[in-house]
Image: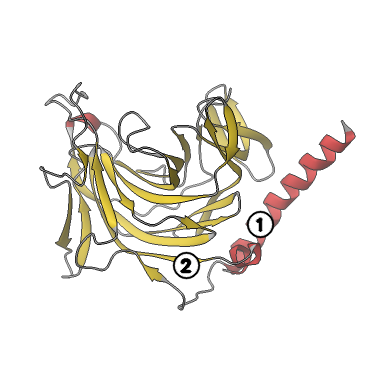
Amino acid sequence: MKNLIRLVGCFLAGAFFIETIFSFSKANSFNDGWEILFNGKNLKGWDTYLGPDFDSLGNKTNMPPVGLNKDPKHVFTVVKDNDGTNVIRISGEEFGAITSRKEYENYHVQLQFKWGNINWPAKKGKKKDSGLLYHCVGDDGADYGFWKRSQEFQIEETNCGDYWGVAGGIEDIPADKISDSQYVYNPMGNVYSFGAQTKTGRHCIKKGDAENATGEWNTLDLYCYGDTSVHVVNGKIMMVLYHSQQWDNGKASPLAKGKLQIQSEGAEVFYKNIRIKPIENLNEILIH
């Protein structure tokens, strides 16, 4: 028991250390070594995937998925922003994602997004929703017919930076328990495992709020090294996550690399300046 207490204490101290150092250093910038993931012209380097259609009331049908690289309703397009630059428009009319053709491990990915004006029937009266899924593995449509097994950096109005485990994704996160179904990230809180197979469920709420007003651009930074990840919104840490795993065939195994997905989830959203840079050691998370 004493060893367990020491282990938990070191874990929490590490969480506080990462958050503290990152808070002082997040303003630093680095300009070299980036791989551009959106070329500003088209969706080269990405696949599209759409699940089953929705009816006019916003209910998922029992039809087969639309499938891979089929987009009859033009959910995923490249359009001009107000300043004339090209951006990715995700209409949200159908649920699915664009998926990177490459897998990544030990990286910093950065992108910008802003909300559009449209909420489709599936999200009528609800917050606009999307998401950055990372460490994506396995079959398309594993999660409710739409997304791969992965970890989610939530992109949703007022909830940007939350965590969701997708189709078996599991993370350990220090948090405060608000209720049996609600946990809020706290770097000095108790450590809980989050995923569909855990008692806590698969959702952890981020700390604070850093999202800009609807219609304004936001910058998201995701740092992943080994089994640790950091969610950052507009330069502010939302949470630090540990021991990334996946639940598969009745057991947990490491989940530390995979593809990226950007969700279409019932709302119009725009993305630009998507890029990724390798991280060679944990210090790069702390320094940058």
Between 181 and 142, which is closer to the camera in this rendering?
142
Residue at image location 29% in from the left, 50% down from the top: 214
Residue at image location 19% in from the left, 23% down from the top: 61
Disc number for residue 215? none
Between 119 and 273, which is closer to the camera in this rendering?
273
Between 24 and 267, which is closer to the camera in this rendering?
267
Residue 40: image quadrant is bottom left
Could you tell me which quadrant the C terminus lies in?
bottom right
Residue 188: image quadrant is top right
Q: Which residue is mark 2?
A: 277
Residue at image location 43% in from the left, 55% down from the top: 103
Question: x and y percent of residue 204 in the render?
Answer: 52, 36
Residue type indicated by callout 1:
Ile
Above or below for 151 versus 57: below
Residue type indicated by callout 2:
Lys
Residue with the most extreme right position: 2
* SS assignment at label 2: strand
* SS assignment at label 1: helix
Question: x and y percent of residue 139 in the render?
Answer: 37, 37
Above or below for 225 versus 188: below
Q: Which residue is mark 1?
A: 18
Could you tell me which quadrant the N terminus lies in?
top right
Residue 184: image quadrant is top right
Q: Earlier in the sequence, mark 2 or mark 1?
A: 1
